[in-house]
Image: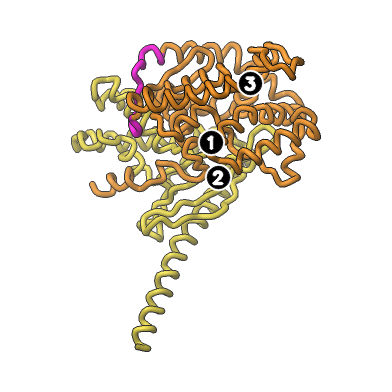
Amino acid sequence: MKILKNVIVSILILFFLTNTSWSKNASEFISSLTDDASQVLSSKLSDDEKIIRLKEIGEKSVDIEGVGLYTLGKYRKTLTDSQKEQYKELFKNYFLKSFSGRLVGYTDAKITVLSEEIKNEKYTIVFSKLIGTSDRPEVKIDWRVYTKDPENPLIRDLVIEGLSLARTQKEEFNSIIVNNDGSIEALFDNLNKFLEN
Amino acid sequence: MNRIITTLFAIFIIQLLVVNKTLSNEGKVRDCFEKLNRATFALNMGLDKVIFKPISKGYRKLPSPIRTGTGNALNNLSNLITIPNNILQGDFGSAANNSARLLINTTLGIAGIFDPANSFGFEKREKEDFGQTLGVMGVGEGCYLVLPVLGPTTIRDTVGSFVAMNGGDVWHNITVRDDEEYVKEFKESDYWASRVTSGVDFRAKNLEAFDAMEKNSVDLYATVRSLYLQDRKKKINNSSDKTEAMDDGDWDTLENQ
């Protein structure tokens, strides 16, 4: 009976330790990431230099390939291998340009991590807020962190005031494909045009 | 009193007999009039460029206390439409909280410019409208629409606005309809001034976000549509922390491939 009790206690301790490990990683990961981004944004670097630094941060902290496939929705099943390779490259460039372009205007972005919710071994949601200023209200930002590899957590979605950026991106891409008779090439053309500008 | 009863009756009839049967189709974007909507969206973007954005930029140059006071007064006014909807949704706690806020801020807060109610423990809660109430009652959002000047909406939200304009909104009643015996100080222009200021206040708070979205979207129309529909869904579910997108289902399909 005592052995059974010890086994149960050990399992519970292991469970809590493992959970703590995911949660700690995800929160610390977001804190450190937002601190880095905040430093870049508030620095005296030129916009072009800031964009380069932000792209580096985005590349190492976001699961760009996963997000790219997610945003294709049902159309990802229709891609040929060569289209898949082409899309991966296009989406990566599109994402980094769009991501850095959206952020570079915020020179006084300070984000505070509030709490988190461990959904399962694959996902932890980290809750945070962008501190308000006299020109901008406080904004809630939730981060969907992919924790399948606990040593290398990656962001898969940002939910700003309850609005998912990944979902918005998915519906945007879907709209382009649908309005071009299901043609994935039309999406590629649009992404290429965006990258050329 | 008759108007309130008529409004309530209309909501239930709409829900039970018409809208619920024909419009409920959650989970999929229903853009039945997309060509027309895109044309209206282009018109609105043009109007924004030459009218609303420059005005909002000018508004942003006002001293911060003036903008905060304006925002507070508009929020206070919105309680007139939020409170009846709190009651219709069965959220009596929020109805009581918002009524106390309206009373305290209108008097001690000088027409809502200041927010002393917060210091008394009556914290600000989410706004509610008749479109949200219809959603809470189970009415589907129906087709997505873009209205000239007013912007994105759905058939359900348009029905909600119709209810507000036909007796459901006390502020509209005492200004535009001019049918309240006890309050005669307000004119129709007050109503439209409050609506326009509310739009400018919102636009001014989101100048950078809109610019970034415009610059970094490959299909801005679809982006705005997605954000509007997600926002309405969130408000109807009264879920400030989580959205449907937080469900793992969508991501699991990716995982399993």
Q: Main secondary structure of the magenta part?
A: loop
Location of mark 1 (residue): A103
At 55% from the left and 38% from the top, the residue drawn is A50
Label 1: state its secondary structure: helix
Three-letter residue code for mark 3: Val
For discs 2 and 3, the disc positioned in front in the rendered view: 3
Label 3: state its secondary structure: helix
Q: CA distance from mark 2 to mark 3?
A: 30 Å
Decide which of A35, A130 is in the foreground and name it: A130
Label 3 crowd (10 A; few <14 / some 14-19 / many >=20)? many
Left or right: B28 as drawn, with respect to B76: left
Label 2: state its secondary structure: helix
Measured as percent of width and height from the top left, residue B62 is found at 74, 24
Measured as percent of width and height from the top left, residue A195 is found at 40, 27
Location of mark 3 (residue): B200
B194 versus A28 height, above or below: above
